[in-house]
Amino acid sequence: MLSTRVKIEFVAALLILLGVGLMVYKVFFLGFPLLPGEYRDVWTIESKISFRPGEGQVQADLTLPEEHAGWVLLDEHFASSGFGFSVADGDPRRATWTRKSLSEPTTLYYKIQAYRQQPDALSGQPDPQVQAPLLAANQRAAMERLVEVLEEKSADRRSFTTLLIRALDRRSEDPDGRFLRSTWDEESGNILLQTLGFAGIPATVLRGIRLEDGRRRQTLSAMLEIYDGEVWRVFDPRTGEEGLREDFFIWQRGTDALLDVTGARSSRLEFALVSNSLPSRSVLAMEQRSGRYALLDFSIYALPVEQQGVFKGLLLIPVAALVVVMIRLLVGIKTSGTFMPILIAIAFIQTTLLLGLAIFLGLVAAGLWIRSWLSHMNLLLVSRISAVVIVVIFLMAALALTSYRLGLDQVLSVTFFPVVILAWTIERMSILWEEEGPHEVLLQGTGSLLVATLAYLAMSNRLVSHLTFNFPELTLSLLGVILLLGKYTGYRLTELYRFRSMGDKQ
Amino acid sequence: MKLFASPGQLRAAGMLGMNERNIGYIGEHNPRKNYPLVDNKLLTKRAAQERQIPVPELFGVVEYQHQVKGLIETLEGRDAFVIKPAQGSGGKGILVITGRRGDRYVKSSGLEINAAEVRRHVTNVLAGLHSLGGRNDSAMIEALIEFDPCLAQYSHEGVPDIRVIAFRGVPVMAMMRCATHASDGKANLHQGAVGVGIDIASGRSVRAVQNDVLLDRHPDTGACFADLVIPHWERVLDLAASCVEMTGLGYLGADVVLDQSQGPMLLELNARPGLAIQVANQEGLRHRLDRAAAIAATGANHDERIALAREAFGALS
């Protein structure tokens, strides 16, 4: 019989070798890049067209994106379950799905991979055309006044556009702008276009997607393009900022409908996005071998985009677990619970580190204070914990609202901060406070935050995310290392301090 | 004293580390299924009574919230008592009442509380405030130990107890834990109580340590630890060693108190005894555990094992 120690060592060695072996194979035989070199952010954009059955024949037409402003399309995939499918090469290209009849809600997929080779300006200008609006009398009056006032204030078409965007903004105090907004039931982009047309400025729309890694159910957004007499200029219709944003993928230029569905109801177009950092070398290879991606078939790239996004996060959790195991077994820092630091670290990834720390400390302190008050009220434990959970939700809502009012969008992500973790932390810390005193709370709280910070740093490290995502088999090696650490019987770093008085004795 | 000891120094001193304790001793010799008997003081007490091991008298048990109302009647006629959670650990949630003043109860610290506060404490115990993992718990009401006056000077505002580590029926190392003002009357070393290493052979003190620093006298009472001899030492060792058989745990810590009239009594058991005992004795556990394993392997009976242990581990012999 083998001892458990030898067994574990054997299994661990096997796991580590398997993980590293697979990685080596991928690096040397499949050409995966081991180290992050010069990187390209390759975006996988998956569009989902969903609709419900209607009457008779169904036809869905989707305008396909073109290569604008330095973007390069690497790859296209269409999924058409039981539909007839064709792509018409026109300007722009359009994909058409057709079917005799439809009996249940259906989703069609179109997936592309794209990256921005270099940030170019938009080329291939459309002809400057002024669109004259159709207006009711009161709208016309308001628009006349608005345009008159703005023309008075502005120097040229650019400044006019910026002022107009501000005047038509939700928060604007301009009475004419507010009136116009109230009479329009379409999105504000159209008021802009119409007003620009009224003022005699050629304008059009850029439709596209705001790129945000891991986003699901992203919808189309629009940018405003105006002709200033010499060139076309892009404006953000929400902020009035000029220029094409880095994170905006242009799908279509012009006001035509992107998606036409006939014979079905409630059609929707949504996008899921994932960004992978790939070395420029492999991106070049992908471009040259467009169509055949043996390289990618062996990795998570082969999964649907939504799952890719989930896996990208999931694969980082073992790294955080390793950090916790090392800190607890090798260093001996106390944390409250084994997995709380990991959960806190995941929350930090959503809020960024410093902000996350601030929010965490603030909410936990407030929660502890409220709980101590509840404790004075002599409530039963269960209702005390439940009350804390509810109060934490209130606190988070209040924080989100205040930050929104102050214009700090980033703090809004606090709504994703797991309530349960916070409430649980508060409860745990306050029990600890009552029993062991503030010293122990400080010790374990600091320990947890320290480990969470280290786990966060490990998880957000570029090399680490590169390795875990491109070589998921390394998770096996991590498992092996964690198993080995589970049999580590040596001293912890803190014990060298704890037993320091034994050092003098021989 | 240096800020850090080197691993080599600790290894030479035979210090047992937390990882090795968890894997080599607790994991190896303490079957998980036997834990409830140790973690639940009520079960420990019943098992001990079956084996005629002396324990503090049990006045009553509160298991359900509706029993809390009748609690004050239960306490009628009892002037001194201790309320503790059956599944508490590390001395958490223990309320010691040393006497009455009219309607009010006097705590060991001298503070007075009213009946409502006693009931609230019991309610908190039932809800699992002090138990491991917050499980629902029951509250035990026990007789207060009248601790032996010869030990009284070594403890301030609390009961001193004697922790004996027994391995496979062999008592391996012992210390007395003395409450101090700093530890708030609790006998927990990490809260500032004094740990006094006790010689296995004679029951005399070896060393005294507070917060890892050696000292000669009790910081509050000024009593000199060098004069300390534990009375009924033979019986203390016997008690601790018997617990190994009772629980089926190979590696455990037995907490013994000395009652003035009834002598050594088993207070509670611990399946995961801490490592501070090594600092209090200024000696590592590992070499002793190896020798204890050798003694156990000889097949000696209960009394012989204790005799062999006293011979092997006597510091002053």
Image (spheres, helix red, strand yellow):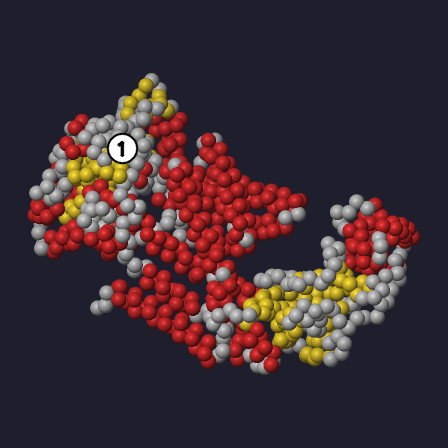
Q: Crowding at label 1, few (<14), some or many (≥20) Cα neighbours within 10 Å?
A: many
Residue at 64% across, 65% down: A271
Picture layout, residue B237 above or below residue B158: below
Depth order, front residue of B30/A488: A488
Q: Is residue B26 visible?
A: no
In the structure shown, which secondary structural element does the residue marked by tag 1 occupy? Answer: loop
Q: Quadrant of residue A350?
A: bottom right
Amino acid at circle 1: Ala
Query: Residue A273: x percent and y percent?
Result: 61, 65
Query: Residue A378: x percent and y percent?
Result: 45, 32
Picture layout, residue A122 above or below residue B97: below
Q: Quadrant of residue A131?
A: bottom right
Query: Residue B236: x percent and y percent?
Result: 15, 39
Depth order, front residue of A136/A169: A169
Picture layout, residue B199 above or below residue B301: above
Residue under label 1, please give it: B179
User: Could you tell me which quadrant the N terminus of chain A lies in?
Assistant: bottom left
- Chain letter belonging to callout 1: B
Q: Is A121 on the left-hand or right-hand side of B121?
A: right
Q: Is residue B95 visible?
A: yes
Q: Is A7 on the left-hand or right-hand side of B148?
A: right
Residue at 40% across, 52% down: A338
Query: Residue B83: x percent and y percent?
Result: 31, 32
Residue that lies at the very extreme toward the front in this rendered image: B2
Depth order, front residue of B150/A454: A454
Q: Is B223 on the left-hand or right-hand side of A130?
A: left
